[in-house]
Amino acid sequence: MPRATNAPSSRERRKKIVDAARGFRGRRSKLFRYAKNAVMKAQVWAYRDRKTRKRNFRMLWQQRINAAARANGLTYSRFMEGLKAAKIDLDRKVLAEIAVSDEAAFKALFAKAAAALDAKRKAAASKSVAA
């Protein structure tokens, strides 16, 4: 009795892998054995780099906010502390966009953060004097 290879399903499975390897160079896009390895590796990198992209964007937003805050006279960490003291809840993505595109709005946020930071320092100083 001849061996059954389940040809339609096997061909479909292999075609799916080769189609996923479209755009790869050379035999990696044409031959199943090499395409399978290339696609598996690409999926590993894609999974890893979805996490890395979030990390990279957060660093970029922090750099932009830091540059804008330093231009106004505070460091990034002091500026963020001031925003928290002023109870302004904006995420870093939005703050970075404001810093880049709307300088007047960022200066208004900066003024509120600086005022809240000063009030916080004065309250801490009065507590330490009273104690």
Image (cartoon, rainbow, N blue to C red):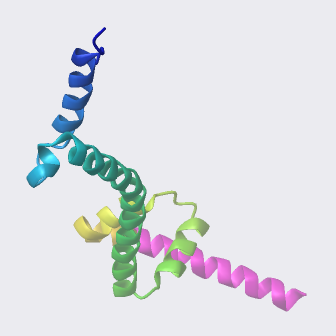
Q: Position of residue 11 (x, y in %)?
A: 21, 24
Residue 118, by quadrant, is bottom right
User: In the image shown, does 92 or 1 lie closer to the viewer?
Assistant: 1
User: In the image shown, does 103 or 16 lie closer to the viewer?
Assistant: 16
Q: Residue at x 31, y 70 (%)?
A: 99
Relative to 65, residue 126 above or below: below
Q: Position of residue 114 (x, y in %)?
A: 51, 78
Relative to 6, residue 93 above or below: below
Q: Position of residue 5 (x, y in %)?
A: 28, 18
Main secondary structure of the magenta stretch: helix
Q: Is residue 94 left or right of residue 23?
A: right
Q: Position of residue 7 (x, y in %)?
A: 23, 18
Q: Is residue 84 left or right of residue 126?
A: left
Quarter holding the N terminus?
top left
Taking the view exactly as shown, the residue that stands out farthest to the right is 131
Q: Residue at x 9, y 54 (%)?
A: 26
Taking the view exactly as shown, the residue that stands out farthest to the bottom is 129
**Magenta span of residues:** 109-131
User: Is residue 121 inside the magenta stretch?
Assistant: yes
Relative to 81, residue 95 above or below: above
Q: Is residue 94 left or right of residue 114?
A: left
User: In the image shown, does 1 or 23 lie closer to the viewer?
Assistant: 1
Q: Residue at x 22, y 48 (%)?
A: 34
Q: Residue at x 26, y 51 (%)?
A: 38
Quarter holding the C terminus?
bottom right
User: Is residue 117 inside the magenta stretch?
Assistant: yes
